[in-house]
Amino acid sequence: MSTVAIERDGEQTQTVGLVEVSHVSKSYGAVEVLHDVSLTVHPGETVALIGPSGSGKSTLLRTINHLETVDSGAVTVDGQYIGYERRGDRLYEVPEREVLRRRTQVGIVFQQFNLFPNLTVLENITLAPVSLGRASAEQAAAQAREQLARVGLADKADRYPSQLSGGQQQRVAIARALVLKPKVLLFDEPTSALDPELVGEVLDVIRVLARQGTTLIIVTHEIGFAREIADRVAFLEDGRILEIGTPEQVLVHPTNQRTKEFVDRVL
């Protein structure tokens, strides 16, 4: 397991969460959505994935926690495959229960909140740790309340999703991901389903997570936010990473013509 010191806000914290994507390709029928993609995200780093619709950003994100299988290549988190195990020079699929266990290392927050409408906020958050045997009901409730406080919703534990705003529901979804203590947190356009006035409250939570040294990979159309928060930005088009570097390099002084055209259009 990789462990490094990451300095955030003047403090050093020990963290894990090395993501290695190596020569990954993925097709749906005759359509290739990822082509020989390689990407390393270091522990505690925040990487933003940007690019036009259909460029492969969300598919790449979903391969990291094995919600999407790959046709070739490999993805590991701290050197471990999520959906496979290596025997000699070949990879073999592991049972679904083992996939679920390993997937808890990589939390994901989707565009839609995916909360169970018939469960309270607290029940939504405690469902996974109890079902997976990670905590008793009492322990899970305490952990859930801790995470709700972390996202500024300590007073909403007994509400139902329909009683919350979209921004509050997305913050509950973040708390639900955090309660399993993932090594890596993935965000797939976390603000795209929100009214403009609610975007800021979700971005504020993500800012805090980045400052605390959580490994974050964010698919976003909020280019100004990517410029502010990301350690690196990757521009994708047609299933390829065309350019990657610091926000200054990619968003202010891009070297790839397609990156420049995209940035000029959206900024």
Image (cartoon, helix red, strand yellow):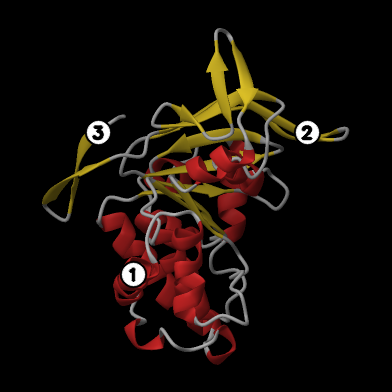
- Mark 2 or mark 1, whichever is nearer to me: 1
Is residue 210 in view? yes
> Quick check: marks 2 and 1 in contact, CB under 8 Å?
no
Q: Quadrant of the N terminus?
A: top left
* Amino acid carrying mark 1 in the image: Gln
* Amino acid carrying mark 2 in the image: Ser
Q: Which residue is mark 1?
A: 147
Measure how far apart labels 3 and 1 are at the Cα level: 24 Å
Q: Residue furthest bottom?
A: 163
Residue at the image point whose x is 50% and y is 84% from the top: 197
| Callout 3 crowding tier (Cα within 10 Å): few <14, some 14–19, many ≥20 | few
Residue at the image point whose x is 56% and y is 80% from the top: 119
- Mark 3 or mark 1, whichever is nearer to me: 1
Name the side, left or right, on which 212 lies relative to 93: left
- Mark 3 or mark 2, whichever is nearer to me: 3
* Amino acid carrying mark 3 in the image: Thr
